[in-house]
Amino acid sequence: MNWSKMNHLKTFHAFHGSRLENFHSIMHFGLQQHFNKNSLFGQGIYLSSELGICLMYSPYSVGWGGSCIGSELSVVALCSIVDDPDQVKCQEDTGENKGRALAKDSLGGEVPHKYYVVQNSVLVKVEYLLVYTRHKVTPSQHVIRPNCRSMLLHWILRNKFICFIIGYGFLLFFIGLSGNVTFQRYFRYCTNKLYEMLGVHIQNTF
């Protein structure tokens, strides 16, 4: 099924909010109904005609530190939807088809006003991305090439649990070595060599 075969159906636009890290998959594979974790009003892709509603599902997340628009971003997709009465659940303004607002697997009853639940991913096409930034970046602050320090800090912020495990492992490792006789002898040897080097350096400077 493709859009060229659905010319007899009208289309409309709606917004979809999601976390920043999800948009890599959305841009490559589109919106997929089986990836949706929210199934209160039935399985499907949840969209809304109100931008403010979708912004609640798009929290600010840390992006690339060298971006000219800022490192904390929020993204909302503006989508085009084929208005299929059987696979797009919503409240109709005319009230002619009252059963359209209720999905068979809905746990919360009818789909609320200004919401759309699309049960077939073929009917949804992402057309635009609305990108929001928390802090405005001036041209003088724009860094084209991020340095190693900013990249390392960005990685640590995104992998706090892994850093904690690595740090804890190093702590246990050094605690174990502190009671090792061979390690203590080697440590004293290195310390004495360091003192000797410093002593020679100090002696030569006077």
Image (cartoon, rainbow, N blue to C red):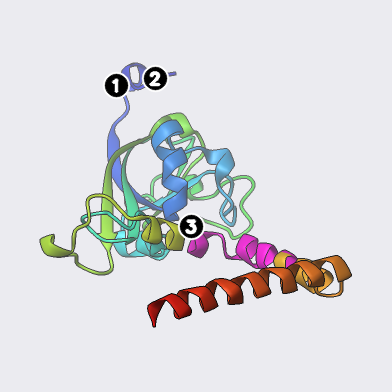
Crowd around label 1: few <14 · some 14–19 · many ≥20 (10 Å): few
| Magenta-colored span | 156-169
- The quarter holding residue 62 reads bottom left
**Labels 3 and 2 touching (C-beta < 8 A):** no
- The quarter holding residue 30 reads top left
Q: Residue 2 — which label?
A: 2
What is the quadrant of the N terminus in the image?
top left
Question: Residue at the left extreme?
Answer: 139
Q: Which of 109 and 161 lies nearest the eye of the viewer?
A: 161
Q: Which of 171 and 6 lies nearest the eye of the viewer?
A: 171
Q: Is residue 83 magenta?
A: no
Amino acid identity at mark 1: Asn
Among the two numbered marks 2 and 1 on one chain, the one whose residue lies closer to the N terminus: 2
CA gap between label 3 and label 2 equals 40 Å
Mark 1: secondary structure? loop
Q: Main secondary structure of the magenta part?
A: helix
**Image spot of residue 197 (x, y percent):** 55, 71
CA gap between label 2 and label 1 equals 10 Å
**Labels 2 and 1 touching (C-beta < 8 A):** no
- Residue occupying image coordinates x 80% and y 67%: 183
Among the two numbered marks 3 and 1 on one chain, the one whose residue lies closer to the N terminus: 1
- The quarter holding residue 19 reads bottom left
Comparing labels 2 and 1, the label whose residue is closer to the camera: 2
**Image spot of residue 66 (x, y percent):** 28, 55
**Image spot of residue 80 (x, y percent):** 31, 38
Q: Classify 156 as above or below 2.
A: below
Q: Classify 32 as above or below 108.
A: above
Q: Residue 7 — which label?
A: 1
Residue to which mark 3 is pinned? 155
